[in-house]
Amino acid sequence: MSVIARNATLLLTETRQLTSAAHRAAVDSLSPGLRHMAGYHAGWWDVSGNAASTPGKAIRPAFTLACARAVGGCDPPAAIPVAVAVELVHDFSLLHDDVMDGDLTRRHRPSAWTVFGTGQAILLGDAMLALAVEQLDDAGATRVLADAVRDLCEGQSADVAFESRSRVDVSECLAMVEGKTGALLGAACQLGAMAAGLSASSAVPYRVFGRELGLAFQLVDDLLGIWGDPAVTGKPAGSDLASRKKSLPVVFALCSDTEAGSDLAAAYAAEANLDTGYAAGLIEAAGGRAWARSEADRRTAAALQALTVAAPTPAGAADLHTLASLITRRDSLTDAGTSAPPAVDRRRPARSWRGARTGISCCVLCERSGLHGAPSCMSWAAAGTWRARRFRSGTHGRRTTRP
């Protein structure tokens, strides 16, 4: 029997509809002050309490429900509170992460700590974690979620520690990401399968699927953190570089034993503000961009192999493939970094990308980067205008449209 694949927009909309009542009920149980901040963070209302509609995409709960369908053929009622618990843990991590990274925006508006204060945002994150535990009434499920939170915190701790270390190996960084990002997505998938009746051990292939996919997701997210359009990511362009974050493409470049890698290390060590466009060029020249895309593809393949071992229902498998594609193919990154970048002038980093200096036209550069033909690329070409800052920031030729 053939299966008609459902698109990602439908799956995410359905997930929000199925989990909305339980999610709001959990938040409504908080004290008025915490409830107000939680609703703002969730995108349900603005800072004044007026209704808003900027919610998160509910990607992790979507994986929970899809894994439940993959086992049982339909959404079991027991999967709804589990999906809500996963989203609440995600909110806990975002609130704390924004504070630690000093990120000013989240979901295209001021992050909670900038509005309510650092202390309040931290306490709200703690409350989200407590609410998540309250959603579960099974000891096995609680153990799985607790293990994921522990791994998440250990990964986040390593991420913070890396910022002050002069050298971080790629293997260390991958282990950090598996904890920080892969653990929760793995738990989301395992818990969904368990809600449909599998034991924790029988649901391990779903956990492996989620953890590997989480690594692929973070690799793509790291690419967006350097070269992504703020309209897609909801964060300022180059924000990861401005804070000297040792994301995966950066770590690969620093460990590449190349001239560009050495220059990047010097730029990261300097006390002056980092020229993010210059740093992005060095990372690409050192191979960090191409490696991250290739590693994301490898991790995605490993995830899909684990899904094959799990033997999901055809409809469930189709939904999971759709969601996997959604989080690993964002912002036309599939072809990014597959061509050699223009040479980096290390003497004058901020000007090395000017069309006048390279003698290369705007659209030739777009073709080299795999972005030629995008709407904004054509509009720039029609105007006969070259903007160095657009290419340096990695947004030239991109559509102006994160999970």
Image: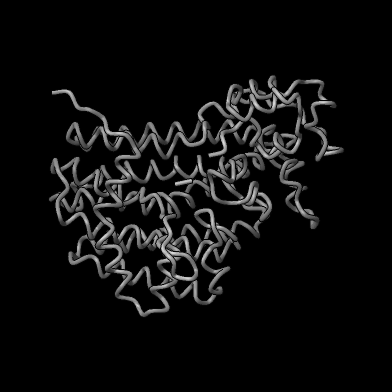
The image position of residue 313, as x and y in percent, is 17, 35
The image position of residue 243, as x and y in percent, is 66, 55
Residue located at (32% from left, 34% from top): 7
The image position of residue 244, as x and y in percent, is 67, 53
Quick check: 392 left or right of 352? left
The vertical placement of 29 against 270, above or below, is below
Residue found at the far front of this picture: 50
Residue located at (26% from left, 32% from top): 318
Residue 84 falls in image quadrant:
bottom left
Quadrant where the N terminus sits is top left
Quick check: 315 left or right of 13? left
Residue 144 falls in image quadrant:
bottom left
Residue located at (59% from left, 26% from top): 371
The image position of residue 349, as x and y in percent, is 81, 39
Q: Nearer the viewer, residue 52 or 317?
A: 52
Q: Nearer the viewer, residue 304 or 43?
A: 43
Q: Nearer the viewer, residue 353 or 211?
A: 353
- In the rendered picture of this protein, how many numbered marks are placed on residues? 0
Q: Nearer the viewer, residue 263 or 317?
A: 317
Q: How are the residues colored?
A: one colour
Residue found at the far right of this picture: 347
The vertical placement of 356 against 9, above or below, is above
Residue 208 falls in image quadrant:
top left
